Amino acid sequence: MSDVYKVIHPNKYFNDYISLNVRPDGRKFDEQRSIKLNANAISNADASALIKCGNTTVVCGITLELATPKAEEPDHGFLVTNVELLPLCSSKFKPGPPSDYAQVISNTVNDIIKNSKCIDLKDLCIVSDKLAWVLYCDMVCLDNDGSIIDACITTLITSLKSLSLPAVSFDVETEEVKVDISNKTLLKVTGLPVATSFAIYQSPESNIVLTDPTTFEEEMCGGIGANLIVCWNQGLLCGVQKYGGGNIPTESQKNLLQVAKKRSKLVEEVIETCLS
Amino acid sequence: MPGPDLLSSQGLRLDGRRPNELRRIRCKLGVFTQPDGSAYLEQGNTKVLAAVYGPHQAAKSKMSTEGVVVNCQYSMATFSTGERKNRPRGDRKSQEMSLHLRQALSSAIKTELYPRSQIDIYIEVLQADGAAFCASVNAATLALIDAGVPLRAYACACTSSVAWRGSQPEPLLDVGHVEEAAGGVCLTVAALPSTGSIALLEMSHRLHMDYFEVVISRAMQGCRDIEVILDKAVREHLAEGWTKQDIVTI
Amino acid sequence: MVAEDFKDFKLKPMKCELNYLSKSDGSAILAQGETVVLASVNGPLDIKITSQSMEKATLEVLFSAKGGKPNVSDRFKESVIRQTCETAILGCLYPRTGITVTIQELEDFGGLLTCAVNCTCLALLNSGLSMKHVVAAVGCALDDSGNLVLEPTYDQIQSAAATMHFVFDSRAKTLVTGFTTGIFSEGAYDEALERCRAASDLVFDFYREVVATYCKVIG
Amino acid sequence: MSGHVSIKLASERVNPSVASNNEIPRFFTPGEVICGLGDFMRGHGTYLEDNNIKSSVAGVMQKVNKLICVHPLKSRYVGEIGDVVVGRVIEVQQKRWKVETNSRLDSILQLSSVNLPGGELRRRSAEDEQMMRQLLKEGDLISAEVQSIYSDGSLSLHTRSLKYGKLQQGVMVKVFPSLIRRRKNHFHVFSFGISMIIGNNGFIWISPIPRELTNEERNVNSDTSSPEVSKHERKAIARMKNCIAALASSKMMLDDNSLRYAYEESFKYLNVKDLLDTEAMLDVAFLTQHRINDYDED
Amino acid sequence: MKETQISNSEKTFVQKIIAGGHRLDGRIYSETRNLQIAFGSDYGSCMVSLGETKVLAQVSCEVVQPKQIRPNEGIIFINVDISPMAAPQFEANRQTDHTVNLNRLLEKCYKDSKCIDLESLCIVVEEKVWSLRVDVKILNHEGNLIECASIATLAALAHFKRPDVTRVGDKVIIHSIAEKDPIPTVLYHYPVCLTYAIFGSDILLSDPSYIEEAVCMCTFEEGSAGGGLLVVGMNQYKEPCLLDLTGAAIHNVNIVHKAILSASEKGKSVVDVLKKAIISDDTLRLKRVKINYADIITTEHKQSLIKKDISICLKNYNANDINPESDVEMDDDVQIVEPSKYDVVPTLPKTAELKVKAEKSAWIEISSEEDD
C-alpha cells in the first residue's frame, strides 16, 4: 500500500515521514547508512575496491600504464579519474556517450582528489620528460541509490592506498624500459579525503538537512546536483560544494560541518580497518 | 603567380587537350530499376552515379507548402580518391557539396509544381579525377529527366581555370585532377545554358578581377557544350525506350 | 578572536551594459575588474516535446569558452549556473516551455565563474523573467600567509592556498551555491562565508543601480 | 550447389529494346521551345517563358485541340478520376487511411468511401471508427478506384464496389506507371487460372481465380483463413510475374492482350525460372511484339 | 524554436521600397553598416561588430605532429559556432546547413586561398608544427554573418602572435610571451568576404540586414525574378578568391561583374580599416596600455553603468592567527561528544563494515509500524 502511495504522491509521502522526524528508510535526519568496504575485489586491476553504502554500490579499479609526460610539465605523472554511470545502475541513465550529469560527477570527483592534494603527481614521474606513470582510475557505479560522490571518493582513496607501483628502470641511451613486478613500493598517499553528502529538503516550515541521502531523497530535494558535499581531509576542509537547491539554514551550517567531520573519522577508521 | 606550366609550348594541356576542350563525356540514363530515375556519367576518368526518388510525400518536418523539397546527398566512395577516404559522407566537404547540389538543381527543377512533396537525389562518386562536382550536377540532371521531373532547362556544370601563355591568360576548360592539384584558380559554374542564367558559382584560389571575365565566359561556354552532349544522350535514351503508347503525336 | 582590526576591502570595479545584444530577449555584458563575460537569455519559448516538463520551464545553460575545444569543465560550469539559476527563476510560471541561457567568456583574469553568475543574473533581470530572488556571487582566496582576500586577482588566485566562491540570494542572504578549491580550516571557511555574505550587499546594490539606469533610459 | 550461373561482361549486355512497327516520333527535352504562345494552352510537362511554350520534361508532345502536353517516358503515377489502382495501406488515421499508390503524395481512403462489412447502407457510427484497423491495417494491399483529386494533387480513393477492397492472396508486381495501357477494364480473369488487376499506377496484382464460395462457407471462413492455392496456380502466377518483368524491361505496354500473348509465348521455356535469363526475357518480349504487330495488321 | 517566417506584408513592403531605391534603414544600395573592431587582452582575440551583428573570434595555437602529406606545413582549423545567443532559432551543438555553409566559406576564404604562410608554422619537419585553431562565435545575428565573421577571422589571424620557439638539439623550447617577443603570423594577402543581396535582375545591396536577407531569399510570385545572396571573397589586390551564390539563379552575368567591381573597392577599404586598427592596437600595447574587452562598455552607452571603487570595511582575518585557538575549541567539542553510535567491524579479510550499534536502534520499531 505504501508503495502505491509513494508512486502517486511522492511529495506527500515524503513529507509525511519528515513531519514525524524520520526518513522513509527509518533513519534519523543526521544518520548515515552502513558501509561495507572491500579492497582488492578485482584481481586483474592493479588496485581496486568495492563499496556498498546502503544500496549504493561503486567499484573502482586502477590500471597502470607508462607514458611520456606532457611537454609543459615534464616531471608530472598522470592521474585520470573517470566515473561511469551505466544504464544498469539506474533507469535514468541511457546507453551512449557520458551524459552531462556523468561528466559533472566525474569532474567533481576529480576536483576533490586534486584539491585534497593526496597524491603528488611528481611521485608518478619516473624519468623527467621521458617516462611517467599514468593511473587510470575507473569508478563504475553498479547501483545508484544516492550519495554517489561519497562512495566514489571512498573507493578511489581505498584503491589508491592499496596501490603499489612496480620498480621501473629506464635506460637513457637505448630508451629501454624494464619493469620489475616483483619489486613493488606502495604509492604515497598523504591525507585521506572523505566526502559526505547532504540533501536539503525544503519543507513548508523550514529547511531540513538529511545526511547521506538516498536517490529518492535526492529527488525530493531538487536532484543530485543540489546536494551539499562537504569533504574533510584529516581535520581540514578540502571542498565544500553546493549548487543551487534549497538554502542552508544559517544556524545548522556549523552543525553540518561537525556531522561531516564525525563521519569522516568513521570512514577513515573503516578504510584503515579494511586495509590492515 | 603562374604555377607549373599547364600549357606546353604547342599550347596543349598536361593531358593533351586543347585549352577549350572538354574531356570525353559518356552517359547512360535509367541504369537502375528501383529509383524513379537514375543515370551514370563519365567525364574523363571521373565517374558518377545518380539516383532520384520522388517526388513523393515529404517528411512532416521538412514539408513545405510553397514547393517541392529538394534533398541531396553527395557521397564519395571510399576508393574514389588516391588516398582512402574515411568518411564517404557527412564530413563538412560532402555536406557542402550536398548544399551546392541542391542550390544548382533547385533553380532547374520547377519546384512550385509539387507542394508537400520531396525529391531525393543521391549521388555516388565512384572515381574522382577532377571536377567531380560538375559531373555530379550533370548526372543528377540526367537522373531527374529520367524520373520525369519537370525542369526549366538542363542544369549543366563546368569548371574552368587559367594558364599563362607568356603574359596572356589562356582560360582552360574542364579542369582535370592534375591541373586542380597544381593550385591554380578553379571556377565552377552551374548554369541553365538555354536561359543563360547562373545557378551556382564557386571559386577557389585567387585570380585578378581583370581576367575574371574570360574565365567565366569559358566556363559558360563549357556548360553550353555539355548541354548539347546531354541533350543528345537524352534523345538517344528516349528513342531506345520508345514504344507505342496511347499518345497521339504530331 | 585575537586579530580584530578592521580593514578596507575593495571589490573589483564593475562595469555593465544591459541589452547588449539585439536578438536576445535579455542580455548583459559585465566586467568585474579584467574578467569580462557576456550572457544572453532567450525564453520562455517553444521547445521539443521530449524536453518539455509539465511542472516548470526547462532551463538550458550553455557556456562557451573563448577558444579551444569544448571540455568537461565547461559542462561543470554550465551545471553550476543552471542549478543556481533554477533556484532563482520562478519556473513554475512557465510550464512546458524552455529558457535558454548562453554565456560567452570574453576575458578570464580570475573569478570567471562568479562573474558569469552575476552576469547571468543581470541578463535574467533584463529579460523580464519572473524570479523569486536575485543572486550575487562573491569569491575570496586564502593566501599563503593565511590572509583572506576578497575578490582575488589572477596572480593572487595562482598563489592562493585555497579559493572559495559563494552565491547568496537577495532575500535572506542564505547560501545558494558554494564551491571551493584547495585545503583550508573550518574557521577560515566560516569567516570567508561571512565576509562574502557582507560583500554580496555591494553586488546587490550594483544590480539596483544598473536597473535604475536602465529604467531611466526606458522611461 | 549445382545452380545455373551465367556471368556476362558489362559490354555484352543484352539490349532489351524491341523494334516496334511505329516510327520514332519527335522528342522534346527540358527547356526546348515547342511553339509560340499563339492561342494554345499549356498542359502537363510544359511551361511558359518569354511568350513561348517550352517543354519541362523529356518525352513526346500530345496535342488535344488547343492543349499542349508533353508526356515523359516515365514518371510517378499521375492519377485521373476513374483509374483503378492497387495500393498499400501505410497509416490508419482518424476516419481515413493513408495509401501508398506510387503517386507523388500519399493517397487517401476515407472511412466514408468504403463498404462496411455486411455491405448494407447504414450510418457510420463511432464504433466503426474504432473498428478501422480491423477492416484494413497497415501493410494491407487494396484495390480501389480514384474518386477525386484534391487541390494539392493527392488522390482520394474509394472501394465502394464489390470488386474493390482488401486483397488476400497473390503477388504484386511494380512497373513504371507509363507502361500501363488504359483500358475500359483493368480486372482480368485468364483462362489459365489466374486473375489480375492491372492498376493504372503501375502496381499489378496477380492472384488465383477466387473460387465461388457458398454463403455458408463465406460465413465460416470469412477472411480468417484463406483457401489453399494449388501448385499449378502458383506456377502460373510465377510465370505471369516473369512475363511482366520481361515486357517491362523491354518497355512494352502492358494490357490483357500483351500479357496473354507473353504468357502463351513463354511456354517456349518449360521451366518458369528459365524466364529470368535476359535473353529469354528479350525473346518473350520479341515474340509478343510480333503477335501484337500481326494483330494490328489484321 | 523554429525560425519565424517573414510575414507577407513585410516581404512586399521591403521589396517595394527597395525597388523604389531605398532601404529600410536609410542606407543607399552600396552603403555598409558601421564596422567596429575591438581587441581583447590576448593576441588573436577580437570582436567585430557590423551594425548590430557581432562576432567574436579567437585564435589559439598548439604544437602537433604535421599531416603526412604535408610534413613541412602547419595546420589551420576554423570552427564556427552559432549558439542560441546569436538568435533563438539556433540550437546548441548542432551542425545545421547554415553552420556548415559558413564554416566552409571561411575555410575556403582563409585555408584554400593560401593567404597564410603555412610553411612558416613548421618547427621540425615531419615532427612538430604549429596548429592554429580559429574559434568563431556568433554573438548576435542581424544579417550578413559571413562578412562579419570573415572580418573577425581575418582580424584575429592578423592580430595573432604565437610564442617563439628555439631548438636545442632535438628539444624544442617554447618561450612564454614574457620571455621572448611572440611572432606574428605571415599573411600573403588579406581576403574578406563581402555579401551582396540580389533583388530583381539588377539591384545589388551591400551588407544586407537580417530582414533584407530573409526577403531576398523568399520565393517571389511566379513570373518575377527571384533573388539570392552572392558572397564575393576579395583581397586588397583586387583579386577575387571566393564566390558563392545561394538562392535563385542569376539571369544576367553582368551582375556578377558588378558585384566584383564593387567588392574590389570595398575589400580594400575594409582591409585598410583592419590594418589601421591592428597598428593602433600594437602601439597601445607597446606603451603597456592594457587592452581588454571591458573597454567595450563605455559610459557613452545609455544602458551601461560603471562603478570604479567599491570598497567595504570588513574584519581582517588571518587563518594562522586563529588556528591554534580554534583547534583547541574543536578538541573540546570532540571530547564532549557522546560515544559514537556506529561500530566499525572487520568481517572478511580485506573487508570492513560500518554498522549501527544494536542498542541504538530503538526508533526502528516506530518506522516498521509505518511501513506496514
Image (spheres, coloured by chain):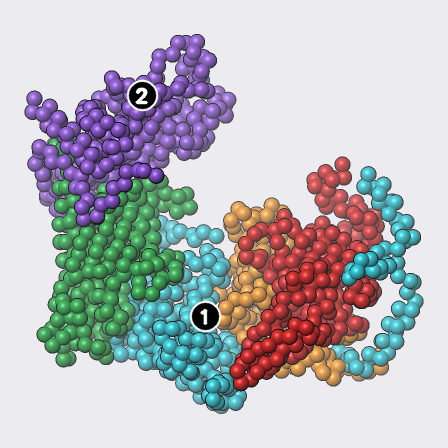
Label 1 chain ID: E
Q: On the rendered image, what quadrant is the N terminus of chain B found in? A: bottom left
- Counting from the top left corner in percent of width and height, residue E362 is at 90, 49
Same chain for mark 1 and mark 2? The answer is: no
Amino acid type of the residue tagged 2 in the rendering:
His
Colour of chain B in the rendered structure image: green
Chain (purple): D
**Secondary structure beneath label 2:** helix
**Residue E111 image-quadrant placement:** bottom left
**Residue at the (88%, 49%) spot, across then down:** E363
In the picture provided, is A109 more to the left or to the right than E202? right
**Label 1: which residue?**
E135
- Residue D232: which numbered mark, if any? 2
Q: Amino acid at mark 1?
A: Asp
**Residue E129 seen:** yes
Separation of marks 1 and 2 at Cα, in angstroms? 72 Å
In the rendered image of this protein, which colour is used for chain A?
red
Q: Position of residue E271 (x, y in %)?
A: 34, 78
Q: Is residue A93 left or right of residue B152?
A: right
Q: Are marks 1 and 2 in contact (CB under 8 Å)?
A: no
Residue at horizontal 75 percent and vertical 44 percent from the top:
A12
